[in-house]
Image (cartoon, rainbow, N blue to C red):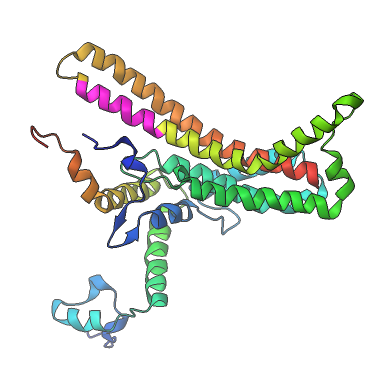
Amino acid sequence: MADRPVPVKDLKLLDIKLGQLPGWLASRNYSPMGFVNGYRRGYNRFYSKYIDVKKGGIGGIAMLLTGYVLISYIWNYDHIKHERWRRYH
Amino acid sequence: MTMNLFDQFSSPQMLGMPLIIIAMAMPTMIFFPPMRLITNRTSAMQNWLMLKFTKQLMSPLNKPGHSWALPLLLIMYTLLLINLLGLLPYTFTPTTQLSMNMALALPLWLTTVLIGLRNQPAASLAHMLPVGTPTPLIPILITIETVSLLIRPLALGIRLTANLTAGHLLITLISTATLTLFPTMPLVSLLTLTLLLLLTALEIAVAMIQAYVFTLLLSLYLQENT
């Protein structure tokens, strides 16, 4: 069944075809407000799916904290790589 | 091995962007505002906790002091979350930086003093001299009370910094000891491991207590001056 054609820039990332990727990337809003809006959208999607449910469990917060730990590890990697155990430093 | 024990407290950077920005914004991501009448579980639990805090903090204050409910509550909640998040592996605790704690303590303390001086100057100056002091002691006591008043912001900031820094440092030291002892003396290593577990439990408690103490003292200074 043929849907009405939706403009590329309105589609979410997981809905576009591979050939449309450069066009999608070019049409994103890269201003500071654009980043803020993008962050807001992403966070609200996560929030309404995992945390804002009637019987949420520890999974939602656990995912947030794990993501935070991962980001901290990646951010600190330059410093952490000196902490490996080796014979000669 | 860590090159320098205090390296864990240096503000980490990547591409020039300090991690402290994410570390300080993290409490906003963990905060779930109650947007409906009957909210989700996490929001409801958090709401219950905040109401308990508010009641505890606001009960000794009089009516004009109740307008301070939101700032005090938010400071308490932010400090609590920042301290607790700092206990996760590889994370950075902004409250170990003296600059941040002084930036919180000094303006807030100054506000309480200025409010007291503006609204009831006689009463706030009268706090300098406790009731019933013998007359010869009055000059010395006034000096002492003034000094103790002026040192409050320093005490507030440094207390928070020192407690958290000391805790983190101890955890690093003891975990290094445990790892180093493990190949040669496993039993001693096991003892050290038990110590580490107890210390981590203490750290969690200290994180919560320090946030509480900070806010409580601020509300106390407010109480004197409102």
Q: Which residue lies furthest to the left in this view?
A: A87
The span shown in magenta is: B168-180
User: In the visual, does B200 lie left or right of A67?
Assistant: right
- Name the image quarter holding residue B88: top left
Tag count in the figure? 0
B5, A80: nearer the viewer: B5
Quarter of the picture holding the C terminus of chain A: top left
User: In the visual, does B137 lie left or right of B106?
Assistant: right
Residue drawn at x 37%, y 71% is A38
Task: Give the x, y percent position of residue B143.
Answer: 77, 35
Residue B81 sits inside the magenta stretch? no
**Residue B133 seen anywhere in this rendered image of the structure:** no
Task: Give the x, y percent position of residue A34.
Answer: 38, 76
User: In the visual, does A49 lie left or right of B191?
Assistant: right
The main secondary structure of the magenta stretch is helix
A57, B220: nearer the viewer: B220
User: In the visual, does B71 lie left or right of B94?
Assistant: right
**Residue B77 seen anywhere in this rendered image of the structure:** yes
